[in-house]
Amino acid sequence: MIDNKTKEVVMQYAAKIVAEGMNGKGDRIAMRTKDGFCVNDASAALDTLKEEDLIELPLDTDDKDFAVIAKLFSKRPEIHALLYTHAPFVCAVARAKATIPAVLDDMTQIVGLNCKTCKSATTDDLVKGLRKRNSVLVPGGGALTVGRTMDEAYTCALVLDKASHAYVCGSVIGGNKIINCIEAKLMNFIYQKKYSKVNQENISKREGE
């Protein structure tokens, strides 16, 4: 049974995704639970999501609609939340099968040095694309983002949306200035290992209360 706190967190962030215009067909919002994970039913859109649309599945589920989520939660125990969203500029880059480089400081910190489009939308390729990463673009449109908390997964999706907008607009008007690789790695390391650690631990306690 999904506890009330998990339902509350999932519903809260589903509403935030819709408010930011990052929702679209096939969206997923998933959160780890004691017995597996909570996720919106495959037929339930985020803009009309109700608590009764949330289901709980075990990590060894054979339901193909949730195979990517189950496999990621199984392989990466540090992940407690996953989002599949469809922000317009993110979708545009994904459909072009392009890579979003480090165009913004907060992207390097939260998203990483870049965000690549997966070779395919198969479970194996998507899981491989998220190896040591917290975001990946899905061929045909959309992005998968993960986090130690739902707040971190959502923040990653939000920053990725902003970075994709900057990348597309910069490309149109003469090119983007990419952050130096060494500087980008340092920013990401400091954020992941130092700045965000205590913050995410505190958020995790609140989301799990």
Image (cartoon, rainbow, N blue to C red):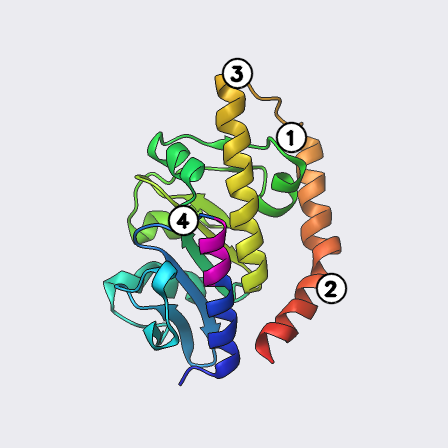
Residue 21 to residue 76: above or below: above
Say which element carries label 1: helix
Of badges 3 and 2, nearer the viewer stands 3
Task: Please report whichever mark, 3 or 4, sits nearer to the chain's N-terminal start.
Answer: 4
Amino acid type of the residue tagged 2 in the rendering: Val
Which residue lies under the disc numbered 4?
128
Say which element carries label 2: helix
Residue 83 to residue 37: above or below: above
Amino acid type of the residue tagged 1 in the rendering: Cys
Numbered range of the magenta stretch: 14-20
* Residue 18 lies in the magenta-colored region: yes
- Residue at x-position 35% and y-position 55%: 27
Q: Of helix, strand and loop, which mostly describes the magenta segment? A: helix
Extreme residue in the bottom direction:
1
Which residue lies under the disc numbered 3?
173
Name the quadrant containing residue 207: bottom right
Apparent side of residue 116 relative to residue 52 in the rendered image (left or right): right
Which residue lies under the disc numbered 2?
198
Q: Position of residue 42 (x, y in %)?
A: 27, 64
- Residue at x-position 40% and y-position 49%: 128
Amino acid type of the residue tagged 4 in the rendering: Lys
Q: Position of residue 38 (x, y in %)?
A: 41, 73
The reply to whether residue 133 is visible in this rendering is no
Task: Please report whichever mark, 1 or 4, sits nearer to the chain's N-terminal start.
Answer: 4
Which residue lies under the disc numbered 1?
181
Task: Please report whichever mark, 3 or 2, sits nearer to the chain's N-terminal start.
Answer: 3
Say which element carries label 4: helix
The quadrant of the rendering that contains the C terminus is bottom right
